[in-house]
Image (spheres, helix red, strand yellow):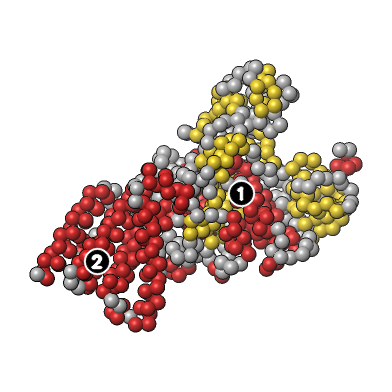
Amino acid sequence: MSQEANQGHIYRISGPVIIAKGIEANMYDLVRVGIEGLMGEVIEIEGDKTTIQVYEDTSGIKPREPVVNTGQPLSVELGPGLLTSIYDGVQRPLPALKEAMGDYILRGAESPGLDQDKLWTFKATAKPGDMISQGDKIGEVEESPGIIHTIMAPRDCNGKIEKINSGTYNVNDTIGEVDDGTILKLKQYWPVRLPRPVSKKLQPDIPLITGQRILDGLFPLAKGGTAAIPGPFGAGKTVTQQTLAKWCDAEIIVYIGCGERGNEMTEVLSEFPQLTDPKTQKPLMNRTVLIANTSNMPVAAREASVYTGVTIAEYYRDMGYNVALMADSTSRWAEAMREISSRMEEMPGEEGYPAYLSTRLAQFYERAGRVIPKGTKKEGSVTIIGAVSPPGGDFSEPVTQNTLRVTKTFWALDAKLAQRRHFPSINWLTSYSLYTRSLREWFTKNVSEDYVNLISEIMKLLQEEEKLLEIVQLVGTDALPDDQQLTLEVTRGIREFYLQQNAFHDVDTFCELQKSAMLMRIILKYRDLSKDALKKGVRVYKLIGLKSKNKIADVKFEKDYVKLLSTIEKDMSSEIERLVGDLK
């Protein structure tokens, strides 16, 4: 491309949308806009006019200022040093920007995504003469304690290694050469909108264990699966995602704060570095990448932040890691799309969102999956958990509905449950998971043979409770038959002893699957023993008042839960036997 074709000028400005004339560009090329060189991306080409969305504030720039096309798509810098980093939406490290500019990011600021000077100890696993292509492992670096960073052949590489050396390098140093002209370095670039290719996609039949009883039990999520967490303001979306980041059994966490309130994101940025990884007792940041794009930052960068995050997640997936990506929240991303679309004067779809909203959401969520990557042949996965913030908690709005079409797990947060201090405030009647059937075999083999049946029984009881509560509102509890009063007591136990979980208690914050199964079993045991006693003539109020049954609440906070459950079961059986014996 000639220098003249590479440079044009601003023709029209509408907020973050700029129309340029005089440049030849391809769709999604990265451009520099104005005297300050603001970062932007080509999103429409019509004749000699090129429409650009700018990722920075455009106030003060004017027509006739220069526009320069870089000729490259928006890409992220991938290599050792991503973990522990805090980036903005276009992979500029916030701590480095703060050091250079203070509390406010100046326009046109540039900073590489990786530390260019830090030295890494590289251990070559490939040798001269080996044939390599994109994604093949050529060596490794210990990025943070316990995390081995696989160095892979970059994009478009295909040839024979001429030389490669182990040693201490920074990300810009040459570590080897390939006969096709490729220079091997610790870092590589990847376009954010281009999914990384894989050898094979696998069935989602291994659960992502979260340690949250309601999720692992009633609405499980598979590794490589997709989940949506919709909920109104204050229902606990961010706390739920932070709990998942801390406890889920993924090795790498990518957390995207996309258009969230600044004070909420500040909390995340200040809390995450303080959190201790429960698995290693080291800082959780050692295996985390944070991307912060708050609601007062330029709207166009929200879209970039989502793609930046998922590209980093795919990079670690290709090393054979299980990655959990938290996007908080995709509603703000959709709002940014709506604003850009309206400034481009496109035909609006439902509620003003662009007609391609569902396509963009699908493209994002479809990048999840459990796969065999190219080159490394080590199984890896990206699990995407997206928070949705429907205005007024209305789940019928377009973003929630379009998200539901592409995600297989729906964890609906309920403001009323949150007001009653029932946490996690996930509504068990409106939530669902389509992974339960594919995970059945894993649960049967690794937890217990009756695990899926226990879940089914618990869900039946909770649905029955909903019907009974409608009758109770009309006639009161005492007017119900004894067996229905017993059902209400059992479901109260399910809600208080099983579904409620204290995220701030050392023991209850994480519940292993065996403990979850035993809790369900003891609650159903109480139901079965009480049903038999009712048939023999025991009054329901005596069964509701069992002292041993109320001790189930203590199991949640007990490390040695097996012994306590065994004691409760014996006490419960003997108490009910005594009640039956008193009738004779």
How far is the residue under mark 2 from the one under mark 1?
47 Å
Identified at 43% across, 60% down, the residue is 424
- Can you say which quadrant of the picture contains the C terminus? bottom left
Q: Residue furthest front?
A: 535
Task: Kindly identify which numbered label has been placed on residue 366.
Answer: 1
Residue 273 in sight here: no
Q: Residue at x 66, y 41 (%)?
A: 76
Give the number of marks.
Answer: 2
Q: Position of residue 504 (x, y in %)?
A: 38, 55
Answer with left or right where residue 160 lies relative to residue 537: right
What amino acid is at disc 2? Lys
Q: In the drawing, what numbered circle is on residue 119?
A: none
Mark 2 or mark 1: whose residue is earlier in sequence: 1
Image quadrant in which you'd find residue 123: top right
Picture quadrant where residue 570 is located? bottom left
Residue found at x 65% / y 22%: 131
Image position, residue 59 (x, y; %): 76, 58
Toward the bottom, the furthest residue is: 475
- Residue 517 appears at what percent x and percent y? 33, 52
Of residues 256 and 211, the one drawn nearer to the viewer in this rendering: 211
- Looking at the rendered structure, the secondary structure element under dot 2 is helix
Crowding near pointer 2: few (<14 within 10 Å), some, many (20+)?
some
Q: Is residue 366 visible?
A: yes
Q: Which residue is mark 2?
A: 531
In terms of depth relative to the viewer, which is nearer, 336 or 582? 582
Q: Quadrant of residue 282?
A: top left
Q: Horizontally, is 239 left or right of 56 in the view? A: left
Circle 1: residue type? Glu
Front one among 195 and 481: 481
Q: Nearer the viewer, residue 101 or 96?
A: 96
